Image (cartoon, rainbow, N blue to C red):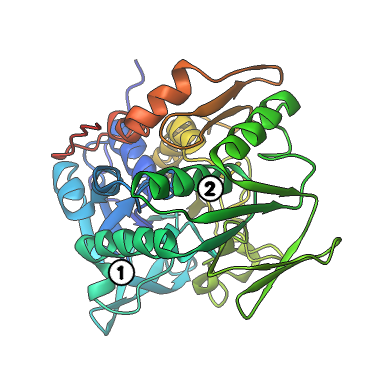
Amino acid sequence: MQSWPGSADKHVLVVGGGVAGISAISALRAKDKEVKITLVNAKEYGEILWASYRSPFVEEVAKGSLIRLPKYCAANNVTFVLATVTNLISTTCEASLLESGEATTINFDVCVVATGANADWKGMGRDLPTTLEESKAETRLKAMKAEGERLMKAASVVIVGGGLIGCELAGDLVSYSRAAGKSTSVTLAHSGPHLGPIDMNERAAKTMESTLEGLGVKIVLQEKATESQGKVTLSSSKEVIDADVVVKTIGFSPVNSFLQAGLPEALDERGWIKTDKHFVVPGSDGKVFAFGDCSSTLPNAAAIYMETCGILGHNIHVTLTGSQVPMMEVTEHKLNKFVATLGPQNGIYQIGSSWWGKRFIPWFKNWTMFLFSVRVNVNVKDEYKVSYE
């Protein structure tokens, strides 16, 4: 077993408390019980975002998808700061924060940026809060419930983007709407040749399509959709669809602007954070790492972050201690596992490029939403319990 030198006099700053951020903390804490860790997050909670399409319809899922960061930090010997980072300077190893309306500064030996990304669909809850009230978990729970009510109240909803989240949302919306005695009309518009990720098996994608159509969802493929004044226009056919609500499950954007002044070489032309094969940000003299949706190093998938966080934890510890043990390299990852629920009774999964099915694994996701996996993998201990009907 590797023996590691202590680093009690070192300080690691983690910016962002989503799955990537707490995975980084868990991996580092597993390597080093003594190092001081501070988590800065703009909200008092982290969210398991793959559940965001069901949270508006099922309160148990909404509650289970939130991780109360003050309690998580207390259990893992981490200092929690509710604040927004406004600037990060690697040469002086300091971050500027906006905390309760006041500007403060925090110093670090190593910083991990895990800020995630914004999404067009506000129901995903990825936006930074604009008020203290918006940073609270109870406010987020109310917003999820309100989003579910808004969607089910609509006579017609157009979902733009037929990736996994778009398909799952469409299936849930028609299913829970029907269960509530409503008849929301749902159209799913996708620019690709088949539903799901481009790497999804075509037979699996066809099964998704037929399942959703069986639930009453109208599928439109190979069409880009443009919204204007409550109407959606399809680019090729020029068909115009009236919509009470338009939900865009496409269009993720970076939230890394705080790096532009102090570490401009960190960002690529689109605004995502660049890293090397060790998760180190260029131009930071090895003091800044990036992990998760804020960076394009890995596919956008929380499961992959939990799988690879051990590499990050190892490399941070090597940096802190000056150990002669070599850093670990992240290998290229491709998404080849897909699990999509299509309403609470249906689903599809794919492992590899050819093996797919629609039985046990989708049922298990419908039953648990895999919310337990974060708690098991990154040491989250809370009162979360799930009991689905």
Q: Earlier in the sequence, mark 2 or mark 1?
A: 1
Q: Quadrant of residue 227?
A: bottom right
Q: Is residue 320 visible?
A: no
Q: How many marks?
A: 2
Residue at the limit of the structure toward the right, as seen here: 236
Residue at the limit of the structure toward the bottom, as seen here: 102
Compare residues 315 and 232 and report the one nearer the observer: 232
- Residue at 56% of width from left, 24% of height from top? 349
Instruction: Assess disc 1: are there few (<14), some (14-19) or many (≥20) residues with their C-alpha within 10 Å of its C-alpha.
Output: few
User: Disc 2 residue type?
Assistant: Ala
Q: Are marks 2 and 1 in contact (CB under 8 Å)?
A: no
Label 1 sits on residue: 106
- What is the number of the mark on residue 296? none
Compare residues 132 and 8 and report the one nearer the observer: 132
Compare residues 208 and 328 and report the one nearer the observer: 208
Q: Quadrant of residue 137?
A: bottom left
Label 2 sits on residue: 170
User: Disc 1 residue type?
Assistant: Ile
- Residue at 59% of width from left, 64% of height from top? 253
In the rendered view, does 64 fall on the left or right side of 249?
left
Q: Is residue 237 above or below residue 78?
A: below
- Residue at 61% of width from left, 50% of height from top? 275
Q: Quadrant of the N terminus?
A: top left
Q: Quadrant of residue 274?
A: bottom right
Query: Where residue 158 sits: x, y (%)?
Result: 60, 60
Q: Quadrant of the C terminus?
A: top left
- Residue at 33% of width from left, 28% of height from top? 367
Query: Where residue 377 sits: x, y (%)?
Result: 33, 30
Secondary structure at numbered mark 1 = strand
Work out how far the residue at label 2 is from the one at label 1, CA to CA, in angstroms. 44 Å
Query: Where residue 27 sits: x, y (%)?
Result: 36, 35
Q: Is residue 295 visible?
A: yes
